[in-house]
Amino acid sequence: FEMIDAIAERNVSLCMKDYNDLLMLDTEPLKILALIQMQYNRLYAVRLMVDQGEKNEVITSKTGIKPFLISKYRSAAASYSAKQLLVAKRACLEMNEKIITGNIDRQAGLEILVAKLLNL
C-alpha cells in the first residue's frame, strides 16, 4: 500500500497523490485508517523486536509478516523511535474513535491523522 509507505518515509507529495487517488476511487476513509493502523502496529512490533536483537525469522514468526517484506519493515521501523511509533498507534486509535463516534468527519479526520503522522 503505497500511501502508507509514503507516510512512513515522510514523503508528503507521494502521500497526498496516493491519498487523492484513493478518494477518487471512493475508498472509504475508515478502510484507509484501518490499513494505516495495521501498518503502525506492525512497525511498532518490528521496532521492539529489532531493539531486542531478534533475527528476521523470529520477527516473521511473531508478526506474520512475509519473509520477503521483513527488510522493508526493518528499514521503515528504523526511521522511527519506539516512542514515535507508540504515539502513531495512539493517534490512529484516537482518530478511529472520533470518526466512529461521529465527533469528526471521516475524511477530515483521516487528513488530520495523516498530517500528524507525516510530522512525527
Image (tube, helix red, strand yellow):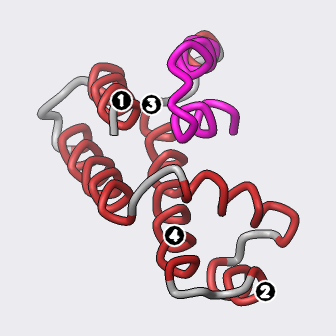
Q: Name the residue under label 4.
A: 47
Q: Earlier in the sequence, mark 2 or mark 1?
A: 2
Q: Distance between the residues labelled 1 and 3?
A: 6 Å
- Give whichever of discs 4 and 2 has the lower sequence position: 4
How far apart, in angstroms, are the residues tagged by discs 3 and 4? 27 Å
**Quick check: is 105 in the magenta stretch?**
no
Task: Determine whether the residue tagged by mark 3 lies in a helix, strand or loop.
Answer: helix
Give the residue at mark 1.
110
Q: Residue tagged by mark 2?
A: 57
The three-letter code of the residue at mark 1 reads Leu
The crowding category of the residue bearing disc 2, from other C-alpha atoms within 10 Å (few below 14, some 14 to 19, many at least 20), is: few
Magenta residues?
Answer: 1-21
Q: Position of residue 31 (x, y in %)?
A: 51, 40
- Secondary structure, mark 4, is helix
* In the image: residue 91, left or right of residue 16: left
Q: What residue type is labelled 3?
A: Pro
Q: Which amino acid does label 4 sit on?
A: Arg
- For the residue pair 97 and 37, the one nearer the viewer reads as 37
- Give the main secondary structure of the magenta stretch: helix
Q: Which one is in front in this view, the residue at disc 3 or the one at disc 4? A: 4
Residue wearing tag 3: 29
Residue located 18% across and 41% down the image: 98
